[in-house]
Amino acid sequence: MAERTLHPHQLTALKGLSRSLRTGHLRPILVAPTGFGKTEVMAAITKAYRGVDRAVLAVAPRISLIEQTGIASASMASSTLASFRRSITSLMRWLRFR
């Protein structure tokens, strides 16, 4: 997947999330309207913190949103990705009935 350039409003969100993490907030949340580019911001922050002794949990209502970032496919073998997809699908079904 080609690297994408973030728009100014996305860069502002990314800087805010990064600042929040640096100051000790463990679970920052980005709330923004449809079309804002939250998936792109999530991909950028995940890539920035990958391998920095941090775990990143990205939660999305559809697997396709995670897949479109290229993060899952870049960091998992296809068999692992298939297993991941089944696990997330099962978790989403379970959460729907809670």
Image: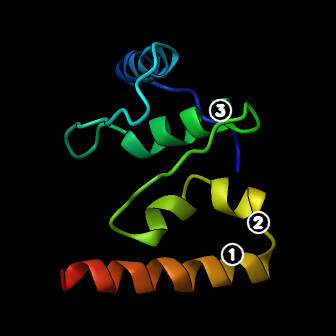
In percent of width and height, residue 59 lies at 40, 57
Residue at 74% over, 77% down: 80
Residue at 76% over, 57% down: 75
Q: Distance between the residues labelled 3 and 1?
A: 20 Å
* Residue 3 vs residue 52, the one in the foreground: 52
Q: How crowded is mark 3: few (under 14 residues within 10 Å), some or many (20 or more)?
A: few
* Residue 23 vs residue 49, the one in the foreground: 23
Specify the quadrant of the image occupied by residue 9.
top left
The quadrant of the picture occupied by the C terminus is bottom left
Q: What amino acid does circle 1 point to?
A: Leu
Disc 1 + disc 2, Cβ < 8 Å: yes
Specify the quadrant of the image occupied by residue 54.
top right
In percent of width and height, residue 95 lies at 27, 77
Q: How far apart are marks 3 and 2 (CA)?
A: 17 Å
Residue at 66% over, 37% down: 47
Left or right, 29 with respect to 47, comes to left
Badge 3 or badge 2: first in the primary sequence:
3
- The residue identified by callout 1 is 81
- The residue identified by callout 3 is 49
In percent of width and height, residue 66 lies at 51, 60
Q: What amino acid does circle 3 point to?
A: Tyr
Give the label, 3 or 1, closer to the camera: 3
Q: Distance between the residues labelled 1 and 2?
A: 6 Å
In percent of width and height, residue 38 lies at 37, 41
- The residue identified by callout 2 is 76
Q: What amino acid does circle 2 point to?
A: Met
Circle 1 SS class:
helix
Specify the quadrant of the image occupied by residue 96.
bottom left
Establish if 22 lies above or below 53: above
